[in-house]
Amino acid sequence: MTASRTLTRTREDLAAFLRKHREKIAPEEAGLPRGRRRRTPGLRREEVAALAGVGLTWYTWLEQGRDISVSATFLDNLSKTLKLDAAERRHLFLLAHQRLPSELAKTWCSVPPLVQTLIDDLPTRPAYILNLRWDVLAWNTAADKLFNFSAHSPERRNMLWLLFTDPAMRQRLSPWEAQVSQMLSSFRRDFARATQDPAMDELVEELTKVSPEFKPLWKNQEVNAPCQGVRHLYIEALGDVALEHTTLTVDEERHLRLVYYAYKRGKDEARIFNEWIMA
């Protein structure tokens, strides 16, 4: 398909998308009186144009699928006028050939039941769910055996908090400082995505007060991209073990991620580790 044909198709799709969503909005939903003699459902073009802050002619051209340029600011205003959800807003930007502006992220604190079922179906693979703040929202039996999440109250069941304040977690990570420094640099990316979330600020402020190690590491300003690799742990019954780990997104909109561990070494050692997990 040629570039001109692609542009024509997306402009046609954009026009249809705008008409459909304009017709879905009742005048009262937009703060307008219904009035009389509305020949079509929803909002009129002139009403959408006024609410979005553009001229009627310009908006009419856009809804007719003409090749005109649009700004991200206008598309955001139009998204609000048409009351688009996150998925619809993203689709609007794609149809208009505009880069989607980054949104300020928020911390989500619940996990769909099916996600809990998913990790429960991994009996020998430690797995748990983190939100943007690194609260541990769900875990399977193997992860509890490894990290003892259930021993902590919900308000303190936060991976970053445990890394810096829980002696058992400190002993589990071996060596502690190198690994926790890398994990903290990964958390910094999430912290930057939620600059207006007070819960994130509160966590950092509390850790700064209670942990002598946290403050200098936080000031390093290091950012580590990978969320996968090898985690070295010490288990009393087994000694030093190396587990491969990776992070998978389970809900992009709510920033929920699954952290998954698997034993790295040979079959005999993996069998021993699995027996320990299941004991």
Image: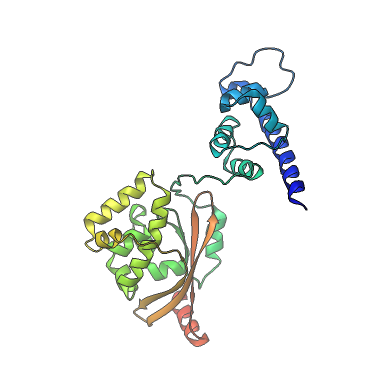
Left or right of 271 in this view: 33: right
Direction from residue 86 to residue 182 in the image, left or right: left
Q: Is residue 43 visible?
A: no
* Residue 14 point in image, percent of width and height: 69, 38
Pick whichever, 88 or 165, lies toward us. Answer: 88
Q: Quadrant of residue 115?
A: bottom right
Left or right of 114 on screen, residue 161: left
> Can residue 14 be seen in the rendering of this structure?
yes
Display colour scheme? rainbow
In this view, 31 is above or below 201: above
Q: Which residue of the protein is positioned furthest toward the top in this rendering?
A: 36
Identify the residue shown where x is 49% and y is 54%.
256
Q: Position of residue 120 (x, y in %)?
A: 53, 64
Give the position of the C terminus as an image quadrant. bottom left
Is 171 drawn above or below residue 90 in the view shown?
Answer: below
Name the residue: 52% across, 70% down: 123
**Residue 129 percent coordinates (x, y):** 47, 59
Q: Which residue lies at the image location 35% right of the left edge and 70% below the top edge? A: 179
Q: How many marks?
A: 0
Query: Could you say which quadrant of the image residue 25 lies in?
Result: top right
Residue 161: give x, y in percent of width and height: 32, 59
What's the residue at 64%, 41% (across, down)? 96
Q: Relative to the observer, which residue lies in front, 49 or 185?
A: 49
Residue 197 vs 149, above or below: the answer is: above
